[in-house]
Image (spheres, rainbow, N blue to C red):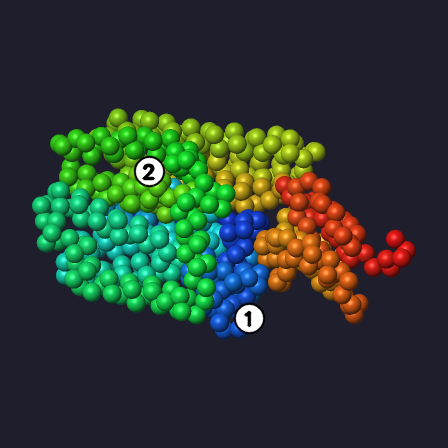
Amino acid sequence: MDAHPITVSRLAIGWALALGVMLMAAWGDPQSRTQEARVLLGAREMLEGPAIRWLIPTANGQIRLNKPPLAYWLSAGSYAVFGKSVLAGRIPAVIASGLTIALTFLIGRRLFNERAGLYAAGTLLASWSFFRFGALAETDVIVMCLLAASVYAMLRARDSRKTATRWLYLIAVLIGLIVMTKGPSAGYVLLLMILIDAIDGAFNGQFLRESLTKRFITTGAIGLTLLVGLPWFIYIFVASDWRMLTHDLSNSARGGLGHSEPWWSYLPQVLLATVPWVFVWMIAGLASLKVILKKASDDADRVSLLIIYAWGIAIFLPLLLWGNKQPHYLMSLLPALMLTVGWGIDRAQKQTQQALRTPVFATLIGMMIAGLIGGISVVLLAWKIRPGVTTFDIAICAMLTAGILFAMAVVRWSKAVGLPIATIASMAAAFVLMKAIWAPTLEPPGSRQLAEQLHQRYPGATFVFRDEASLTLCVAMRQVIASMNDEQLEALAVQPRTGQQVICLDEVSGEPLPLHRYKRLARLESGEDDLVVFTPDLLPIATR
């Protein structure tokens, strides 16, 4: 491996390919999450509405102060450049994910070596949660990137006292930006800073004099955090209903909004997040614990691994204590998990690590074989989900199988590409083919297809929702759609109109309740919840 150094040009090509993979993820994933719909709607309404919307965002016309507005601003800026499409709204998330990959490499290189950083960055790209959520216009993707940048800045600040102040100022700005993205998540950075200080103090005995936390305060960097993070909150407290923000924070801390789970619910979610590297992560994790606990081990490796563990603790412990628990909250944890994987693969390649080499490389080979089986199972899965197998199913199966066989042949006959790189490339390609290209063809009609049907069937109509709006459908319809209760809908039905048809949309899982003064026009299938369409019954009362 050393005969083929990691040059800047090779890194640039690899990063460009990684951006391409994430762009495919953004393109192929149909917009179906309410969390993302809020950001996309808020961004669009910032551009289309009055300037005040940039400070007091709305989603489908309703003021939304549950989260700070940085993610909205980024998607709005992308809309202004690329147009108002879902893909354009996701461009900032794609860039943030690409930066996180680059930062993971830089952190791995600084803590261990270039190969460990490269493997960590590659396995991050080809991991399930990163590919699933990393291209969505949601706050957790931005927080993940800003947190990784904060970790890198901390490492630079602790390694060079001469340039430490500028890195501490950068950390301050990054913390402020996290506050402007997701408020309490900024606590991850402060907790990690304290833990790194404790690790350094345990190994060099200079905790108080060299403390990052102390210098963060004494250099005035903390004031920069307040300057970046507080003005918007002060404005909201003065100019708007700040209780909306505090109520959401309190509700989330208690586990409201239907996402309350026991603390241990995150344990299987962590395993799922690291798929397909879960077994490599377990092997590397056990090996890293052995290094940390063995006093005869190299202190540099022990300190680096402890920093990775501190990164994980600074995120995972608060998440366990926080009432609201959702899989995408683990996004900020992924770089730390994959750095452990990268370290394990790198150490397994060294001839002195035979105990680690055998299980790691056996697992990588098993992953390639599993990929072959997965490619063949595409046809069987398609046949089970829908009647018949299409030519497209067979093509996906053939491309996936051929790609993995080619990667295995390259490993066998070429010294330039090793098994780890071939496995990373195969897993990334499998995600693109299976998740971004093939999986959408198996799903029932989504919001985009429903919007097309509604526009075709009822051109120029006034649409309203019954009780609660579907924000994902609002994104697809590209308009603000009011929601009304039954009394308001009945009043709307008897209002005089000038030829514009009123269409009431009711999202239900079973049969909807009758709606007085309305007749049912259609039921449009859409996954779990169907869309029932009503319109006012204009027959005179005497003829009923």
Task: Residue type at mark 2: give it.
Answer: Val
Q: Report which residue position mark 1 lands on.
A: 49
In this picture, is 532 found above or below 280? Answer: below
Where's residue 323, x and y in %?
40, 43
Where's residue 291, x and y in %?
21, 33
Please tell me in which quadrant of the rendered image residue 513 appears. Answer: top right
Q: Residue at x 47, y 51 (%)?
A: 135
> Of discs 2 and 1, which sits in the foreground?
1
Where's residue 527, x and y in %?
64, 42
Q: Residue at x 73, y 62 (%)?
A: 492
Which quadrant, please, contains the N terminus?
top left
Label 1 residue SS: loop
Residue 77 visible in the snapshot: no
Q: How many marks?
A: 2
Q: Report which residue position mark 2 lands on.
A: 341
Q: Residue at x 59, y 57 (%)?
A: 475
Q: Residue at x 40, y 47 (%)?
A: 253
In this picture, is 445 found above or below 411? Answer: below
Q: Is residue 225 left or right of residue 269?
A: left
Q: Which residue is at the front of the view, 399 or 517?
A: 517
Alpha-carbon neighbours of circle 2 within 10 Å: few (<14), some, or many (≥20)?
many
Task: Residue type at mark 1: give it.
Answer: Gly
In this picture, is 39 found above or below 409? Answer: below
Q: Is residue 339 left or right of residue 160?
A: right
Residue 520 visible in the snapshot: yes
Q: Which mark is residue 324?
A: none
Alpha-carbon span between mark 2 and mark 1: 47 Å
Mark 2 or mark 1: whose residue is earlier in sequence: 1
